[in-house]
Image: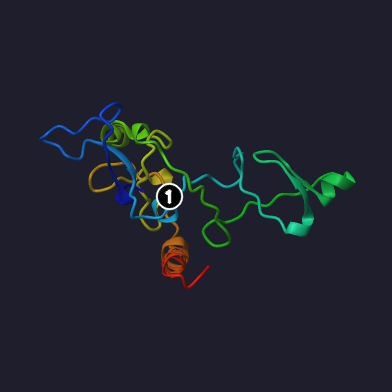
Amino acid sequence: RHDRLVPYIDNVDCPPPPPKNATQTCLAKSPNATYLSTYNCDRPRPPGKFVRAKKEIYRPSFVKSHFVHYSTVTLETVAGIKGIKERWTDEGTEAVMLHARTMEGADTRRWWVTCRESVEQGVCDVGFPLRRGGTVEDGGRTKEGYLENCVSYDKVDEYWLPLLERRMAERQKGILV
């Protein structure tokens, strides 16, 4: 999420910004923010469309083997049962899985141009959350003119993030081991 990133300068791929525009620099995760906080900005995917490495939720006793980014081997596949049905999960109300990953500073080169000029999803790697109730089809833009390109989950910000930060603080104080 753009609002949780900090300027990044390495003097190679990401030089210092010009004197007149301090915002024109590469970006990186803030050392003061958790990955969960920074990357609570998921690319929305229309339900029912093929998604590479899609998210899967199964009961542990149901899964016999799992291959990263490939099909899951379940009781039905082992038994050779045909016609297994899938159901798409409503990520707004049922479950969500975030990919907590980071970007290299150089991956955000010229973000201030790319993200303002982009007219389609997937062009800008810096996250600008959709407004409440907004969809990517709306083509909404921030007040600075950047294309809104990701979903920020309220439950992550309001429930999971405070819980994580509290537990991290307790662990640092030696309360949790």
Q: Position of residue 58 (x, y in %)?
A: 71, 55
Using the rendered image of the protein, determine whether residue 81 is visible from the camera's viewpoint: no
Q: Residue furthest right?
A: 79
Q: Which residue is mark 1?
A: 39
**Is residue 139 placed above or below 133 in the rendered structure?**
above
Image label count: 1
Q: Is residue 169 left or right of residue 3?
A: right
Foreground residue among 16 and 48: 16
Q: Position of residue 139 (x, y in %)?
A: 36, 43
Q: Residue at x 42, y 37 (%)?
A: 121
Q: Position of residue 17 (x, y in %)?
A: 18, 34
Q: Residue furthest top?
A: 12
Q: Residue furthest bottom?
A: 175
| Amino acid bearing label 1 | Tyr
- Which quadrant of the structure image shows residue 73? top right
Q: Residue at x 31, y 40 (%)?
A: 27
